[in-house]
């Protein structure tokens, strides 16, 4: 068990933005809230998955909605504390820890707000190793756990408890509709998991990875080096894919998502080339042309857009015409590359008729393959 | 306390269709379910409001959604029993009775299904004396009671419990979005009320009124008289407004409602005239032309469309080109005619810039005015 202090916040926020791969929402407001809570004396403890008891229960915490909406709404003080209390009332069981719903963007920080408000530790693991736009896109659901109960909370602390959801797709549909009615952004408990389930179905160490990434990026910046180098020091499989300027941006916020296409005109050694990136909250696919062989990278591998001047990773809500970018690819966590997982988070799950050609390696640098996936318990 | 038997069902169903004023959903499927439950030995008891204890709690039960969708979905067996059980789990209190959410259409019968499934009595009162399309349009909410908790249930028994709703308009927005995601039709507990609240804010005797209406209509039909006469025997203020044939029908099911405009060409003594009726699930306004003085009747007074051949009152989901109709107006219950009530259920609440010119009388034939409305407790 270790503690998050004010010193860790910039690291975490900067690294989580990288893992967001465009989504997960801005870290800015969550970081402000967390900063204030820590200054007021709140404690945020981090537990390794191994420290949890088999039967310990934890809510899987995050936010739901389009990041373009999330940046306009300050997380309500007490929101996550109330969600955790409502969960306890609905289930009759107390939580022993908080699980991270997605380690990308602001959603990496909201569980820490929940920890500060509830006193519960956050487990250093998540079910994505990045951010994804839909509720079924995480290893807990891919392995067959059900979102039960699912809780949503609006900015005015209206809570909704959904039970008996037959599958994660139904959960996605219902929660998306309600989130949209709630103004486009809501606090979310996706489900509850046990300590045993986190160990079996989660991706361990992703909170620490975010912290390491951010620390390396800030270190690189301090040494007048590119944050691209900082990232490459932490994720061995990182690959520089493109460099250029945004010359076109189609974007609309619709049905609960921020969707669009980014067109980037090459600079430096990429001059004369064009890269197009589609996004649905997260960046989904990068292409240098219309042919199948022009695909550079697809989900679940991570597309990271780093603004050249600041060296910061940009979420899809922060894009604008004229920004100069480095485009990086990071290999996804190995848990996302099984056939079961690719059916839910691979290119075909987003409607792209292209194969997943993975970058070599694992996001967390693990070498041995994971044991074959087992049925959820 | 009295009991509903198989003999009462046709009366109730036919009368509830009249009070639906176009909405509340078809009575057909609910009647089938109720018939089967009664045949299997289930009991449905009816209590007068005076029989309830001050602190007795009851869920306000009904269905939500567009009637055009409701007719395609059989009410799930056990749906209302599960809703009542979920309510008890969410609040920690047991229900002592069931309250009717709206006495129009199929929604008049669904509380009886809940009674058959739970063994609880249904109180002979409702907060509309008719059907209305939106959640805030009832005397409980008009008098300031909050929908807390609000429960929805889909056809696969997924339940949603919404708490801390700040007002009925927010409840309407959230519940409508979720109902739409649920396929357009959902079981609903609007709120819970106490026995004291039913007596103070409810409209007493409306279930009995539905029964009397249906019995008189069936009696008239048996005596080869028009059901128009049967209705007029029970509701003294009923007025024959028009007779004609549907020559045009604009209808769309959108955002959770069935909306449209009916054009009726006059027959008999109305030959050469045209009547237009707007609906949003329920019939809202009848006009013989485009001038303010052409308005014949508006909400909250009831527009009843009786098919000439069968003598049945038709819901907006059953309309089709060529049907020959009698159009009747019934005076609304006096509780709907206060300034507070008209702000929520009068023509202006539906966007019509016309005054409410009430038919004389009260739906239930009461003469003395109701005491001034008081703040909800």
Image: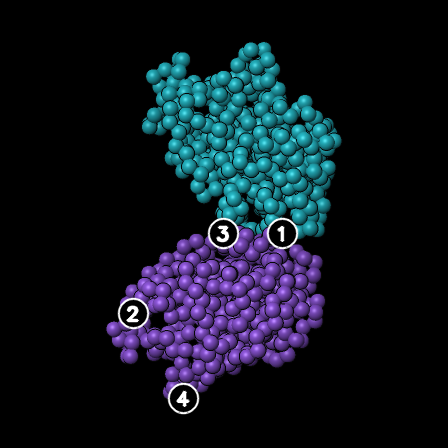
Chain colours: A cyan, B purple
For the residues carrying marks 2 and 4, which lies nearer the camera in this image? Answer: 2
Closer to the camera in the image, B235 or A363: B235
Q: Label for residue B164?
A: 1
Query: Please, which chain is the residue tagged with disc 1 on?
Result: B
Number of other residues with Cα within 10 Å of mark 3, as a class: few under 14, some 14 to 19, many 20 or more:
many
Q: Separation of disc 4 and disc 1 at Cα?
A: 53 Å
Measure the C-alpha gap from mark 3 to mark 1.
17 Å
3 vs 1, front mark:
1
> Do marks 2 and 4 both belong to one polypeptide chain?
yes
Mark 1: secondary structure:
loop
The disc, 2 or 3, on the residue closer to the chain's N-terminal end is 3
Instruction: Say whether mark 1 and mark 4 are on the same chain.
Output: yes
Q: Earlier in the sequence, mark 3 or mark 1?
A: 1
Q: Residue A165 carries which label?
A: none
For the residue labelled by badge 3, is the local secondary structure a helix, a strand or a loop? helix
The residue pinned by badge 4 equals: B223
Along the polypeptide, which appears first: circle 4 or circle 1?
1
Residue B107 coordinates in the image, percent (x, y)? 51, 67
Name the residue that disc number 3 marks.
Answer: B177
Q: Is residue B104 visible?
A: no
C-alpha gap between disc 2 and disc 1: 48 Å
Q: Which residue carries the number 2 mark?
A: B274
Q: Give the residue drawn at x 44%, y 22%.
A: A323
Q: Relative to B188, is B28 above or below? A: below
Q: Nearer the viewer, residue B351 or A90?
A: B351
Q: Could you tell me if the residues under marks 3 and 1 are in contact, i.e. CB atoms within 8 Å?
A: no
Instruction: Please say if A146 is above or below B200.
Output: above
Residue B307 % position (x, y): 36, 75
Are tags 3 and 4 found on a single chain?
Answer: yes
Q: In the rendering, at what x and y percent does residue A338 appear?
A: 51, 34
Q: Which of A20 and A6 is in front in this view?
A: A6
């Amino acid at each position: 068990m270790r503690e998050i202090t004010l010193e860790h916040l910039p690291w975490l926020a900067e690294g989580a933005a990288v893992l967001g791969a465009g989504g997960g929402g801005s870290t800015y407001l969550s970081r402000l809230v967390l900063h204030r809570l820590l200054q007021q004396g709140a404690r945020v403890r981090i537990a390794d998955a191994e420290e949890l008891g088999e039967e310990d229960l934890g809510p899987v915490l995050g936010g739901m909605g389009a990041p373009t909406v999330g940046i306009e709404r300050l997380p309500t003080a007490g929101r996550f504390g109330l969600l955790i209390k409502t969960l306890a009332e609905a289930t009759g069981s107390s939580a022993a820890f908080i699980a991270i719903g997605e380690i990308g963007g602001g959603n990496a920080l909201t569980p820490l707000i929940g920890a500060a408000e509830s006193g519960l530790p956050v487990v250093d693991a998540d079910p994505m190793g990045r951010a994804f736009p839909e509720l079924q896109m995480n290893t807990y659901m891919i392995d067959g756990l059900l979102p039960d109960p699912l809780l949503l909370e609006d900015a005015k602390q209206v809570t909704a408890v959904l039970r008996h959801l037959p599958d994660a797709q139904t959960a996605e549909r219902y929660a998306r509709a309600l989130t949209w009615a709630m103004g486009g952004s809501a606090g979310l408990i996706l489900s509850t998991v046990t300590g045993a389930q986190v160990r079996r179905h989660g991706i361990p160490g992703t909170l620490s990875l975010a912290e390491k990434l951010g620390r390396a990026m800030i270190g690189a910046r301090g040494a007048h080096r590119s944050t691209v180098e900082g990232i490459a020091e932490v994720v061995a499989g990182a690959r520089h894919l493109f460099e250029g300027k945004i010359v076109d941006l189609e974007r609309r916020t619709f049905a609960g998502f921020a969707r669009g296409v980014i067109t980037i005109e090459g600079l430096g050694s990429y001059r004369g080339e064009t890269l197009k990136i589609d996004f649905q909250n997260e960046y989904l696919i990068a292409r240098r042309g219309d042919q199948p062989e022009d695909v550079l990278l697809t989900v679940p591998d991570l597309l990271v857009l780093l603004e050249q001047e600041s060296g910061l990773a940009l979420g899809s809500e922060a894009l604008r015409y004229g920004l100069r970018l480095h485009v990086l690819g990071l290999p996804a966590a190995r848990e996302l590359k099984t056939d079961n997982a690719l059916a839910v988070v691979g290119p075909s799950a987003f409607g792209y008729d292209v194969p997943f050609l993975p970058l070599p390696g694992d996001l967390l640098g693990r070498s041995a393959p994971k044991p074959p996936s087992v049925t959820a318990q």
